[in-house]
Image (tube, grey):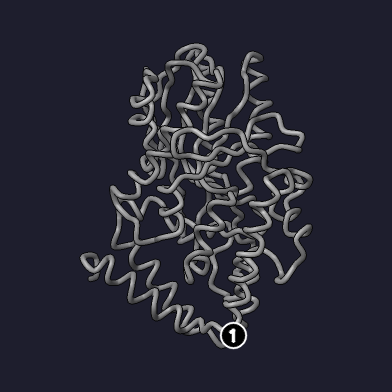
């Protein structure tokens, strides 16, 4: 478990329209961290078949509901400036959802941070395009995927320096993310930098869709996971609704990543198709190199079986409704038990067939 997540727990913060809202509590945090769960984002993160404009639409319900709830809680005003980090940030429906909630968007700004490649090696990151306004006392809205956090840190520090140069100021930041545990560490590091320049800075409100996921630190039990890129559950904080949703399907837990490449899913669907099919084809090739039990335990996030109290602690559920959590615990144990005799090759063949049928228009 990440040190800054120890002793933390989920608390129900509210229910707005079709979205459940949880607050991460118990930590010594400067900022506010929420997890939201909605049918659309559950489907998106459990199903790589959701692509293109459908992936955008699937995020609208949760995003709109959360913005409406934040207004009710007086955690944002009636106007905002949207900063889009190209290209992943274009997946997030912030402008549309502001419009739905009567939030006036004063400026739409853009920033592009791209890898610098020399001699076939990634040597750094470079800001190559910006369109940036710098008003005073703004609420800045951003949506992006956070894995290693390097791109985000580079962009945020650039925004701070440009606002100082241009005489602007930032009152608060609201950040929506399909993201990993690094997001918390990063925002806790960046907030003192904001306050150094603008003592009135209220902090960051970071909203995670469905969970605070972890990024692999190695290639995993299969030997084919991508470190610092692929998301999974272990050592994260997952909404109870998303756990049940995924485990209600026989195969969803075993996908390569929670989101795969978010930009490719929206804008380069053939590339997304190739990544998903290559994963399942590679799984078939290496199936004899690992046990299915180890694979299951890696994906579910702990060494099965475990007792109820330990399950509550690992999943940060100790303050949630005890009857609902006990039911979820039993449901999860039953999933693990019936998975013991599964064949990873059969799962791979089934997923390849389903995925190819769903995205057959993108087969080359």
Q: Measured from the top left, where is residue 159 in percent x and y?
A: 50, 27
Q: Residue at x 76, y 38 (%)?
A: 26
Give above or below for 264 relative to 93. Answer: below
Furthest toward the left, the residue is 361
Q: Measured from the top left, where is residue 191 in percent x and y?
A: 65, 28
Give above or below for 198 relative to 192. Answer: above
Q: Residue at x 57, y 35 (%)?
A: 206
Q: Quadrant of residue 84?
A: top left
Image check: 215 left or right of 320? left
Q: Residue at x 65, y 69 (%)?
A: 333
Image check: 138 left or right of 360? right
Q: Residue at x 33, y 72 (%)?
A: 354
Q: Measured from the top left, where is residue 151 in percent x and y?
A: 52, 43
| Residue for badge 1 | 289
Quadrant showing the C terminus: bottom left
Q: Measured from the top left, where is residue 296 in percent x and y?
A: 61, 73
- Label 1, secondary structure: give it: helix
Give above or below for 123 relative to 94. Answer: below
Q: Quadrant of residue 128?
A: top left
Callout 1: few (<14), some (14-19), or many (20+) C-alpha neighbours within 10 Å? Answer: few
Furthest toward the bottom, the residue is 288
- Picture mark count: 1
Image check: 271 left or right of 114? left
Quadrant showing the N terminus: bottom right
């Amino acid at each position: 478990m990440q040190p800054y997540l120890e002793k933390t727990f989920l608390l129900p913060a509210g229910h707005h329209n079709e979205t459940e809202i949880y607050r991460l509590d118990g930590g010594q945090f400067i900022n506010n961290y929420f997890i939201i769960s909605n049918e659309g984002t559950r489907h998106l993160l459990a199903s790589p078949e959701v692509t293109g404009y459908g992936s955008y639409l699937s995020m609208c319900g949760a995003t709109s509901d959360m913005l409406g709830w934040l207004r009710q809680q007086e955690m944002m005003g009636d106007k905002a400036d949207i900063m889009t980090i190209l290209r992943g940030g274009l997946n997030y429906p912030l402008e549309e959802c502001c419009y739905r909630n009567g939030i006036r968007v004063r400026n739409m700004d853009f920033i592009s941070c791209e890898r610098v490649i020399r001699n076939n090696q990634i040597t750094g990151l470079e800001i190559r395009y910006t369109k940036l306004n710098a008003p005073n006392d703004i609420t800045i809205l951003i949506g992006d995927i956070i894995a290693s956090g390097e791109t985000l840190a580079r962009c945020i520090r650039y925004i701070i320096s440009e606002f100082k140069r241009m005489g602007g100021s930032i009152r608060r930041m609201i950040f929506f993310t399909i993201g990993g545990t690094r997001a918390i560490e990063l925002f806790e590091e960046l907030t003192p930098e904001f306050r150094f320049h603008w003592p009135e800075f209220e902090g960051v409100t970071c909203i995670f869709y469905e969970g605070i996921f972890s990024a692999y630190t190695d290639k995993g039990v299969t030997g084919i996971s991508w470190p610092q890129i692929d998301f999974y559950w272990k050592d994260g904080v997952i909404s109870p609704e998303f756990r049940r949703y995924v485990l209600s399907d026989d195969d969803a837990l075993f996908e390569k990543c929670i989101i795969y490449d978010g930009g490719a899913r929206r804008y380069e669907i053939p590339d997304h198709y190739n990544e998903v099919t290559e994963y399942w084809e590679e799984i078939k090739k290496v199936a004899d190199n690992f046990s299915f039990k180890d694979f299951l335990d890696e994906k579910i996030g702990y060494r099965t079986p475990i007792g109820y109290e330990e399950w509550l602690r690992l999943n940060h559920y100790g303050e949630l409704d005890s009857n609902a959590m006990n039911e979820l615990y039993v449901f999860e144990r039953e999933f693990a038990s019936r998975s013991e005799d599964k064949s990873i090759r059969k799962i791979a063949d089934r997923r390849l067939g389903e995925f190819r049928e769903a995205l057959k228009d993108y087969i080359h």
